[in-house]
Amino acid sequence: MKSSEMTEEICSCHIISTNELVTLYHGSKSGIHGAIAPVSRERCDFGKGFYMGTDRSQPLTLICNYPAAKIYTLEVDLSDLRILDVEAGLDWALLIAYHRGKMESIKHSEIYERYANLGKGCDMIIGYIANDRMFVVLDRFFNGEITDLALINSLSALKLGKQYVALTATACKKIKILEEKALTEENRAKLKQDSEANRFKGIAMADEICRQYRREGRFFDEIVTEGIR
């Protein structure tokens, strides 16, 4: 498959008109205090918001180093929300690149503006999680170590859960906490081991993919300067 054939069309925001409830998970370093709000740090995968995931283990690995950490089980009502659903592919990676500040060198370019405006006016973005293993592969792509073809093929090799990001107060009001659970010291120790093991697996996979697709596809700097084909 050529790299020019891999770009997925990103659908625009659409409104969920029927009652659709999903069960999701959120990890907090010290617990949720007050109303749920879109107040994560700026440099997150899809921007500032309230992050939730379909895979319970993923947020656990992010909070396992914090003694007061808590894991939440949530019920989210998607009805009447404007939602952008991003498929796994090159567009997904470049949207993350924009939100992580990897496109500042081409600010105001056509490709920069494309991702700067993607998701504007939406209440929520749904997309795959860049978990411990995928984080390693993404960093290698952003740093020019592997091509877009290597990145796309790694997506199919990893079983990534999805993350739901509430971007507005409207979306946050539709989130209901079903369960709050503190992590024991034993839980946290085990999770640290799992997180480190996943990272090493990601490094090994990235090495293999890099070798396999060494001369195929385009690098990140080529894409952001030449545009998506």
Image (tube, grey):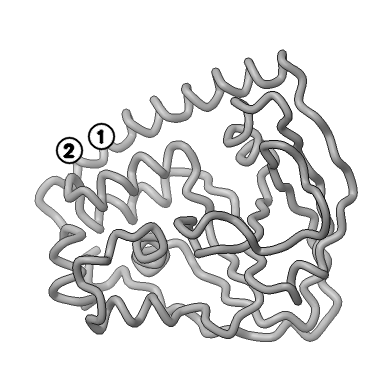
Question: Residue 166's spot in the image, x, y percent?
Answer: 67, 66
Query: Relative to 26, is 16 above or below?
Result: below
Q: Residues within 10 Å of mark 1 (few under 14, many from 20)?
A: some
Residue at the farthest right position: 178
In the picture, the quarter occupied by the C terminus is bottom left
Left or right of 166, for residue 103? left
Label 1 element class: helix
Query: Relative to 54, is 173 above or below?
Result: below
Residue annotated with mark 1 = 208
| Kind of residue sitting beneath label 2 | Arg
Left or right of 224, for residue 63? right
Q: Residue at the spot x=81%, y=46% of the render?
A: 73
Q: Residue 58 carries which label?
A: none
| Kind of residue sitting beneath label 1 | Glu
Question: Residue 215's spot in the image, x, y percent?
Answer: 9, 51
Q: Do the residues labelled 1 and 2 touch (CB within 8 Å)?
A: yes
Q: Residues within 10 Å of mark 2 (few under 14, many from 20)?
A: few
Residue 179 in which image quadrant? top right
Alpha carbon separation for disc pair 1 and 2: 5 Å
Residue at the farthest front position: 34
Residue annotated with mark 2 = 211
Label 2 element class: helix
Left or right of 219, for residue 181? right
Question: Residue 108's spot in the image, x, y percent?
Answer: 25, 81
Residue 81 in which image quadrant? bottom right
The foreground one among 88 and 105 is 105
Q: Residue at the spot x=58%, y=36% of the render?
A: 62
